[in-house]
């Protein structure tokens, strides 16, 4: 009878291993506090990170010369250019000169051209992004696609490829109010363009020299070079109001991050122009967000994530294989999910807003097997 009883005890299931999570997500920070611009549409994002917030109706509205970000992007797509190169050159035609003279008469932003001169791709980019020359935009369009109409079709195709669902172009310069977009779309486009080193370098220039010019041409974005602002593009027309798409790299807790955003459709006052107000709005958003960015220690390498408990012995720990302390802002919720299926290793999935990380976890020691003595004596 004793032998039979012992055999039964040994044969009985030993019970399930239980996992007890001991790591607690950091407490959710208070809500983000932002004074958003009045009378305009605006959007803020962090890269890497995602959307921070937005204000305004999020409707497609005219964007003025902000359009030229896409014009420059397509030029660089057709003729890739290194930060050290000048690229191929285009020869200025009589039509280019005539167009320049007409733009001067109508008081548009221009960069002077003369018939027969050769202008390199780099100089065209400077004239497009810093001088914001409308005539340069059309020269680029004809050079890349043969005509402004064909180039505009490419602009819309590229916008669709980028997922800019509320963006539509009718020309390469932005003067036509049919060029419309939203702050979110323009921020996405800016981040795409700023991934190209030579684009990033040129929009950060406070001024440029220009062939035939006696004085330097100042960047309409006068904030470039101040307070760490590196771009990206301004726009200002009667229909578009003041527009500013911006980028501002920051270092938080030793980690690099870039603030991107846009202010569109700002109106002027009797004392301040619409462009000036949009620039001030963008700078204010950058500074407000910068003050609220912080690293959040989620888990430290070697920290116990969970205890593996067994009925027959001491528990074993699952420990993190690396540390995680991402840059976040108030209001972002942190969620943690442990994935462990009884093996030596597993993962801790951490999500914060649109971002996610996988932290490797492993057992601090093998899970002990039940001893024969424990099997026989259990429940007695």
Image (cartoon, helix red, strand yellow):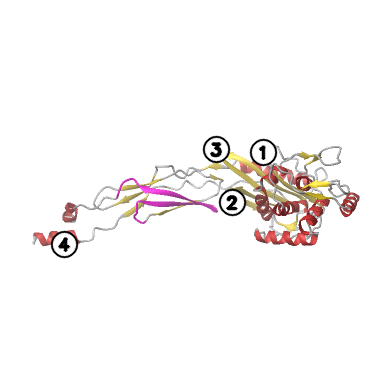
Please report whichever mark, 4 or 1, sits nearer to the chain's N-terminal start.
4
The residue nearer to you, when weighing 192 against 320, is 192
- Extent of the magenta region: 341-366
In what element is the residue under mark 1? Answer: loop
Quarter-of-image position of residue 156: bottom right
Say which label, 1 or 3, has the lower sequence index. 1
In this orientation, does residue 73 appear?
A: yes
Image coords of residue 236 (percent x, y):
79, 50
Residue 14 lies in what quarter of the image?
A: bottom left
- Chain-order first, disc 3 or disc 4: 4
When the figure is inspected, residue 300 is found, relative to residue 41, above or below; the finding is above
Q: Is residue 299 left or right of residue 90?
A: left
**Residue 50 got which mark?**
2
Number of numbered tags placed on the structure image:
4
Mark 2 vs mark 1: which is more N-terminal?
Answer: 2
Q: Earlier in the sequence, mark 3 or mark 2?
A: 2
Q: Which residue is mark 3?
A: 254
**In front here: 253 or 265?**
253
- Give the alpha-carbon distance from disc 3 to disc 2, as whole Å: 19 Å
- Residue placed under numbered mark 1 in the picture: 228
Q: Is 194 left, or right, of 151 in this rendering?
A: left
Q: Is residue 40 visible?
A: no
Q: Left or right? Give the position of 299 relative to 238.
A: left
Q: CA distance from mark 3 to mark 4?
A: 61 Å
């Amino acid at each position: 009878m004793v032998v039979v009883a012992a055999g039964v005890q040994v044969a009985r299931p030993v019970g399930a291993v239980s996992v007890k999570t001991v790591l607690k997500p950091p407490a959710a920070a208070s809500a983000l506090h932002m004074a958003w611009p009045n009378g305009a549409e605006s959007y803020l994002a962090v890269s890497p990170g995602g959307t921070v917030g937005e204000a305004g109706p999020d409707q497609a509205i005219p964007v003025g010369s902000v359009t030229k970000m896409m014009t420059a992007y397509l030029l660089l797509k057709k003729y890739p250019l290194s930060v050290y190169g000048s690229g191929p050159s285009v020869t200025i035609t009589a039509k280019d000169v005539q167009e320049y003279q007409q733009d001067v008469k109508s008081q548009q932003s221009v960069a002077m051209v003369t018939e027969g001169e050769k202008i390199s791709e780099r100089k065209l980019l400077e004239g497009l992004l810093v001088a914001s020359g409308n005539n340069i935009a059309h020269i680029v369009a004809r050079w890349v696609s043969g005509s402004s109409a064909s180039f505009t079709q490419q602009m819309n195709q590229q916008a669709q490829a980028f997922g800019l669902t509320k963006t539509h172009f009718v020309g390469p310069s932005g003067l036509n109010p049919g060029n419309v977009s939203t702050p979110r779309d323009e921020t996405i486009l800016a981040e795409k363009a700023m991934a190209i080193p030579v684009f990033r370098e040129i929009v950060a220039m406070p001024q440029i020299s220009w062939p035939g010019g006696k004085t330097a041409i100042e960047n309409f974005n006068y904030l470039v070079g101040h307070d760490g602002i590196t771009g990206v593009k301004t726009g200002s027309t009667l229909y578009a109001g003041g527009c500013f798409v911006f980028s501002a790299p920051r270092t938080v807790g030793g980690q690099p991050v870039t603030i991107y955003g846009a202010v569109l459709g700002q109106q002027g006052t009797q004392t301040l122009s619409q462009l000036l107000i949009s620039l001030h709005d963008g700078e204010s958003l950058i500074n407000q967000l910068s003050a609220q960015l912080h690293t959040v220690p989620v888990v430290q390498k070697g920290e116990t994530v969970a205890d593996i408990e067994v009925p027959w012995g001491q528990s074993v720990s699952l420990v993190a294989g690396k540390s995680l302390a991402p840059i976040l802002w108030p209001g972002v919720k942190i969620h943690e999910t442990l994935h462990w299926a009884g093996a030596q290793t597993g993962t801790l999935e951490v999500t914060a807003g649109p971002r996610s990380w996988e932290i490797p976890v492993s057992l601090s020691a093998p899970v002990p097997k039940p001893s024969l003595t424990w099997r026989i004596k259990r429940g007695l």
